[in-house]
Image (cartoon, rainbow, N blue to C red):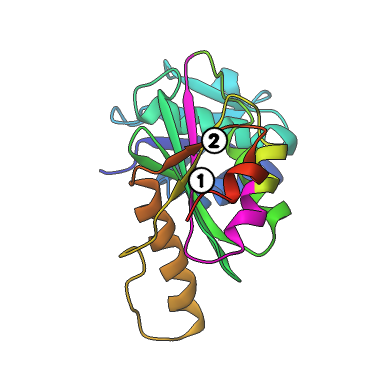
Amino acid sequence: MKEKVAVATVQGKAYFLIVNQLREQNIPFISLVPGQSVPDKMALVVTTEQEKHLVNHEKILVFHSEDELDSLVDEVMKLLLGKEAFEKIVIGIDPGVAIGLVAVADGKVIEEGNCFSTKEVIDSILKVLRNVDFAVTSVSVKIGNGVPVYKELLEGLDGALPPQVILEVVGEAGTNKPLKENKRSRGVRHISSATRIAGRTGNIVPRGKAIEANSRIQ
């Protein structure tokens, strides 16, 4: 049984929101009715405040509201990895008309997708970082330099991200592997390139000085 998460609720809206978010993060789960026996292999159970007294398990996470859903799933992911907090988060960005973005936490992809504006990239990164304690988690954002638009994106990131975030500019040579040209493959390619960028060592850009640094980075 690969599933380690059980969702135990008969509240329709709560169930819909929880399972959709788990599916988005590729977290396998089983569904239970509160009061039903929880299989031994389950690492945790997600339920609601009203139903938690019906769940018999040592690790229960409670869904309170849609606003807290992202935080809830973050906690699920950390518990599945056996961590109280991530040690290192690396975000790779492949600039272009479609901007590939991948966030890797302690070696596991926790977010990926394509963005279509600097604002969307910033919002996606801030979502990843919303519960990060920078005292225990180091964060690096690595951006490929394959197209000139990366400079504008770098400036936006420099101005919007917390000062603890390390910005790096990474050479993109070899990160783009050809795929059959169709809309879906192009989207996958950008994400794949962002993953490779996240795995490379780049040139660190001093925060607050992205504009000056742009003129020196080739």
Residue 127, x across and y down, in percent: 64, 39
User: Circle 1: is it few (<14), some (14-19), or many (20+) Cα within 10 Å?
Assistant: some
Residue 49, x across and y down, in percent: 67, 23
The amino acid marked with disc number 1 is Leu
Residue 67, x across and y down, in percent: 74, 36
User: Is residue 60 magenta-colored?
Assistant: no
Residue 14, x across and y down, in percent: 67, 41
Q: Quick check: 66 left or right of 147? A: right
Which of the labelled discs sits on residue 73, or is there none?
2
Q: Residue at x 35, y 31 (%)?
A: 42
Q: Residue at x 30, y 65 (%)?
A: 174
Which of the labelled discs sits on residue 22, or is there none?
1
Contact (Cβ within 8 Å) of mark 2 with mark 1? yes
Q: Is residue 149 visible?
A: yes
Q: Is residue 36 visible?
A: no
The amino acid marked with disc number 2 is Val
- N-term-proximal mark, 2 vs 1: 1
